[in-house]
Amino acid sequence: MARTTVGILRGGTSSEYNLSLKTGAAMMAALPEERYETRDILIDKNGVWYMRGTPVTPARALSQIDVALNALHGGVGEDGTVVRLLQRSGVPFAGARALPSAVALNKILAREILQKAGIRMPRAVIFSLKDNFDTTQMAKMVFDRFGPPYVVKPPSEGASHGILIAPHLQALPETIGNVLDEFGDAIVEEWVPGLEASVGVIENFRNQTLYALPPALVVLPQGARMLEKVHHEEGSLRHMVPSDFTQHEKRALMDAARAAHRALELAHFSRADFIVTPRHTYLLEVNTIPGLYPGASFPPMLEAVGSSVGDFLEHIIHLARQ
């Protein structure tokens, strides 16, 4: 029986380059060699495509595969750029289409859609360099809505990149300015103290149209106040699955993850991140390309239901080729 040739796109131009390399490596290691031939398609930090160490055009790289798996976290991998190339190539691929992927990556657009769908999120005020306010005025506008501490984040970064904390009002103008200077837009969110959780969603899995994996409790390194980029890169996070959330909390998390997947019109799979407090569950963001690297939340969620990364990949390859 002929093997299926799977092109695995990894690397990319975003701040998550190293994590993408790890997810791609995990994909290649998980696919059974007797059924799949994997092709490592590397996109470097300048956007140049490589196969077997040689620069190639995207068209040539994609012409040599039966199906594509996108392991490009953030940047061109999730803003619709590479997905549009995949769509034009006619090669089957797993994951969200170009527009939903771009919308999900943009926290400003995604927030508008998710809140209209009735999904609870932390309160936020959004600013741009185009706004006719100085950062002191911006800080006052935020303070009029909710009090400190504040989480200030860029609109289209992942793995906690670019997120800053303003512990009090006096620190907020400079913090907003730093994020605006680097990214052009800034989202100022209320700090919601609670436990962090992740929930994976898979389409047409285990005889369910939209299957929610059991929530993973994110266990931060000792002394850490919040999830930071370095925790992803060092692999210092732990994910407790099964978690000790109550059954009510688990149902709320799983229902919200499904609702977010539907609201953003995603495809095949996604991962939603939350804060859980004694009173409410708050959605933070939705990822169209969940990490599969050591220390990521998706693998232990799969293992908790008797599945594996390999099973998951074979399932989404099947979905892509349908």
Image (cartoon, rainbow, N blue to C red):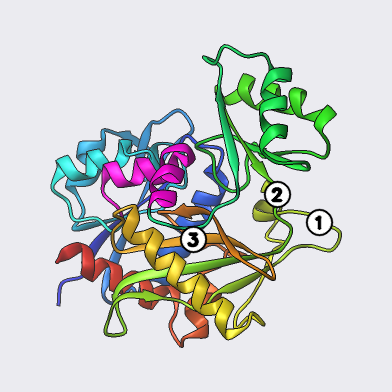
Residue marked by disc 2: 228
**Figure quadrant of residue 257:** bottom left
- Asked which secondary structure carries label 3, the reply is strand
Residue nearest the viewer, comparing 310 with 296: 296
Q: Residue furthest bottom?
A: 306
Q: What distance separates the C-alpha of mark 1 from that of mark 3?
A: 21 Å
Marks 2 and 1: in contact by CB < 8 Å?
Answer: yes
Residue at 52% over, 35% down: 155
Question: Is 107 one of the magenta-colored residues?
Answer: yes
Q: What distance separates the C-alpha of mark 2 from that of mark 3?
A: 17 Å
- Rendering coords of residue 58 (x, y %): 26, 37
Of the residues shown, which amino acid type is indicated by label 1? Ala
The magenta region covers 96-116
Residue marked by disc 3: 272
Label 1 crowd (10 A; few <14 / some 14-19 / many >=20): few
Question: Is 51 one of the magenta-colored residues?
Answer: no
Q: What distance separates the C-alpha of mark 1 from that of mark 2?
A: 8 Å
